[in-house]
Image: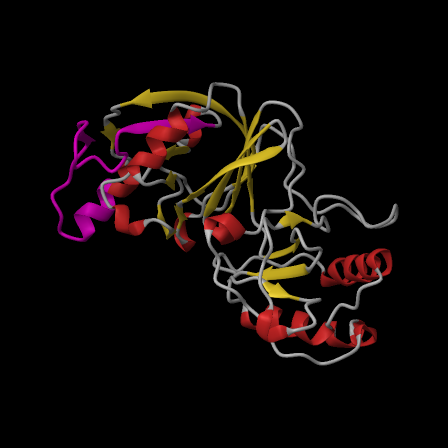
């Protein structure tokens, strides 16, 4: 269906994907606060984006909740920073220990064996049990392995704790399809695996945005590349406009071309995480 919508885009071209480094990581499609700090976590990317006064400052690889204990989406604030935390093991995780034959612990003191690492940065209400923290298993970052919290490598967790403050905004979103433009004006699409098996946003909105971008820039968008990227979901940026596929490369950063955070026209709905104090989740969330 999407291929039919994109038929007018012209020539067939092979898929062009490039290795992703921190320098060329696609930014998520979120309306970032223009002043102050704003943390944006896009779960399918397993990346945390730190913005200062509307500008991207740093990207952290993270491990987020696995399928059975998903990290909830929503809008939050930083509510506390705790150095050398003790881990009070939730009863649900104690039950997991018991089922797997491990020694059941109720409290893990600070130290190298603590799953929270050297710092715990709480976001949202304390009863949610959500936070960014270090880990005693650095090999698990990045990935989908936690009980709902967000793991960072210990040095990154310490760096983040020295940067953020209580009240800083946190947005957790679930965006599997991103559209970005590099410094040379080339258009790139990145499709990620749908780890939580959530519904993708309506691709009619993506088609409309590609049409409007093509019209604004007077540059042809290759529809077949869109279809292949959406099918492959490789997590690698695919150039939709590069003429010489063999020599295509990302120039500079990958800035957002909004299609989720704001409508293409007045009649098109907005698809973004709600800015509210609540969250939506299907399962209990616990630090880990």
9 or 123, which lies in front?
9
Q: Report x, y in % for residue 161.
A: 38, 26
Indicate whether residue 244 is drawn in magenta. no
- Please tell me in which quadrant of the rendered image residue 228 appears: bottom right
Q: In this view, does 55 lie above or below 253?
A: above
Q: In which quarter of the image is the N terminus?
A: bottom right
136 or 153, which lies in front?
153
Q: Report x, y in % for residue 106.
A: 19, 32
Q: What residue sits 41% from the left and 41% below the top?
A: 284
Indicate whether residue 107 is drawn in magenta. yes
- Please tell me in which quadrant of the rendered image residue 115 appears: top left
Horizontally, residue 184 falls left or right of residue 108, namely: right
Horizontally, residue 243 falls left or right of residue 110, namely: right
Q: Report x, y in % for residue 66.
A: 39, 52
Q: What residue sits 66% from the left and 51% below the top?
A: 183
Magenta-tinted stretch:
94-123
Q: What residue sits 39% from the left and 34% below the top?
A: 132
- Please tell me in which quadrant of the rendered image residue 3 appears: bottom right
Q: What residue sits 42% from the left and 24% below the top?
A: 126
């Amino acid at each position: 269906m999407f291929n039919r919508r994109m038929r007018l885009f012209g020539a067939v071209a092979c898929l062009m994907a490039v290795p992703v480094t921190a320098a060329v990581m696609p930014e998520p499609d979120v309306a970032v606060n223009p002043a102050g700090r704003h943390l944006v976590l896009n779960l399918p990317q397993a990346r945390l984006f730190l913005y200062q006064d509307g500008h991207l400052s740093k990207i952290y690889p993270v491990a987020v909740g696995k399928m059975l204990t998903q990290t909830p989406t929503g809008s939050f604030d930083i509510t506390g920073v705790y150095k050398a935390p003790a881990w009070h093991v939730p009863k649900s995780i104690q039950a997991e220990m018991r089922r797997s034959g491990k020694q059941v612990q109720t409290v893990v003191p600070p130290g190298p064996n603590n799953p929270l690492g050297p710092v715990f940065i709480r976001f949202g209400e304390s009863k949610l049990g959500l936070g960014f923290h270090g880990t005693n298993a650095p090999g698990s970052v990045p990935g989908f392995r936690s009980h709902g919290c967000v793991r960072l490598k210990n040095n990154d967790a310490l760096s983040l704790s020295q940067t953020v403050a209580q009240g800083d905004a946190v947005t957790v979103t679930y965006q599997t399809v991103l559209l970005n433009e590099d410094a040379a004006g080339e258009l790139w699409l990145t499709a990620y695996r749908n780890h939580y098996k959530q519904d993708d946003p309506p691709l009619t909105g993506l088609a409309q945005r590609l049409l409007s971008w093509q019209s604004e820039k007077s540059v042809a968008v290759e529809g077949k590349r869109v279809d292949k990227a959406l099918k492959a979901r490789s997590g690698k940026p695919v150039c939709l406009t590069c003429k010489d596929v063999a020599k295509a490369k990302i120039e500079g950063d990958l800035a957002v071309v909004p299609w989720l955070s704001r409508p293409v026209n007045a009649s098109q709905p907005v698809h973004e995480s709600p800015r509210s104090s609540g969250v939506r989740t299907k399962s209990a969330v616990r630090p880990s």
